[in-house]
Amino acid sequence: MMGEEKKISVAVIKRLPRYFRYLGELLENDVTRISSRELSERMGVTASQIRQDLNNFGGFGQQGYGYNVEYLYTEIGKILGLGNTYKVIIIGVGNLGQALANYANFEKRGFLITGLFDVNPRLVGMSIRGIEIQDIDYLEQFVKENEIDIAVLTLPKVKASKIGQDLVKWGIKGLWNFSPIDLKVPKDVIVENVHLSDSLMTLSYKLNEQKVLQKQDNKKEK
Amino acid sequence: MMGEEKKISVAVIKRLPRYFRYLGELLENDVTRISSRELSERMGVTASQIRQDLNNFGGFGQQGYGYNVEYLYTEIGKILGLGNTYKVIIIGVGNLGQALANYANFEKRGFLITGLFDVNPRLVGMSIRGIEIQDIDYLEQFVKENEIDIAVLTLPKVKASKIGQDLVKWGIKGLWNFSPIDLKVPKDVIVENVHLSDSLMTLSYKLNEQKVLQKQDNKKEK
DNA sequence: TAGATTGTTAATCGATTAACAATC
DNA sequence: TAGATTGTTAATCGATTAACAATC
């Protein structure tokens, strides 16, 4: 029956951009076809996983041949929704917000920065890549008048929660959240978190674990 | 037998910083004790998972009482290796590198920025938070003379791979990689990736999926 | 046609959840 | 002591891997 598709797991979705990246590289190197086995060796995953992952979305390969790199690249791009353009606003134009505003590659992928907002009067009025930073007081009006797809939250923890709620109220459906908080949102709103301090702590954990393992090894050698 | 501990899964490790964050908030709000059930409700996970996760590292709770917030917070901090200090260098001091260099919270957690490097002659000689940006030519010497724990890679894709290899050769054991590549490193070197474009693509995918679901709902309503 | 490799089903593995005895 | 809640074992669920028939 239609519409009865099994839900794709987050684990699979998170792997798609990586496939996309590898296929892009193959394409740059003029590789026209690739088998799941060879791709698996390059990526350090199992061929089985690649085939399973792809077959969640359709049969992109051909028996006895493998996958056409360009075709598969295009198809995964479509699956990731990269054909679309998204109107993006950045809220909090500190160092990180500026970094993201300046990152040209996002524009290439269809993420168009259409508004920048900050509370800091020193920043308001300045421009980044031709876009003027507005006072956050104008945020509500701006969001309501422009069809914004994604709001990037790069502001201090204390403000992020409130602004996040407001944005949802004003109709935003996508949040790219860099603040170290978990936003509570209705289920039709998508939040993608980038928790840098979490990432750094994970690194810290692993470095420590590594040290412990080395000590154990040293003992064994004695 | 000693040293026969079961390996902690990445899934568990990745959850630790989140526990740490929630416990920190509880502490700020003067909550002294919490049960796995209550924490689970706040975090949107199962109480069972919390207890399982924590018991990988030890019994931090007390039957009939729950967990002492401050104690648990401290212990998870220890597990995450936050008692240590790490010497950190940032390679590539563009917008993102600058953002990270300016992020004071990292210092608080023991991640001390001790060197900044870039190829861009315009940046070399400038200072961020009292640290002068050096030409990347001095990187090798600097790494060999100072015991650097973590190198942050915030440079263009094309350079990242080579520099990453070099750093490993020069003895770096921890890499915090922001470049959209997968570094190949020996197994005693830890790489923690922050792939911003992957994250954005995941958001894009989910926004698209959301749209599709809404269309299906609309159909059903008719 | 023979060889290669997919798409897909079945088997395995690991992670999450449930249940409950231990115990504060 | 009775009630609450942990620590931990057992059951379930889901994701990964293996296997192989289908087919290019």
Image (cartoon, coloured by chain):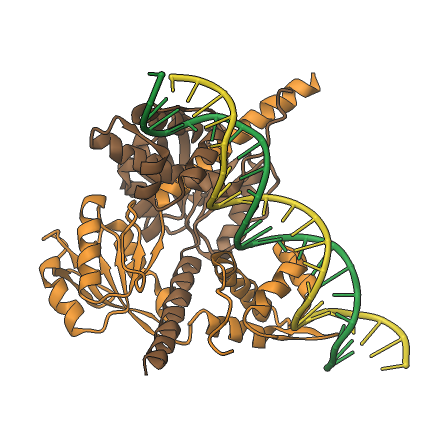
Chain colours: A brown, B orange, C green, D yellow
In the image: residue B54, left or right of residue A114: right
In the image: residue D10, left or right of residue A24: right
Q: Nearer the viewer, residue B58 or B66?
A: B58
Q: Nearer the viewer, residue A30 or A122?
A: A30
- From the image, which quarter does the C terminus of chain B lie in? top right
- Quadrant of the rendered image containing residue C8: top right
Where does residue B137 sit, x and y in percent of width and height? 9, 59
Q: Is residue A89 visible?
A: no
Identity of the residue drawn at 28% across and 36% down: A105
Identity of the residue drawn at 27% across and 52% down: B184
* In the image, farthest residue toward the bottom: A222
- Quadrant of the rendered image containing residue A171: top right
In the image: residue B37, left or right of residue A171: right
Q: Nearer the viewer, residue A86 or A220?
A: A220
Identity of the residue drawn at 24% across and 65% down: B172
Where does residue A96 sit, x and y in percent of width and height? 34, 51
Q: Nearer the viewer, residue B70 or A10?
A: A10
Say if A2 sits above or below A116 in the image: above
Where does residue B16 sit, x and y in percent of width and height? 51, 63
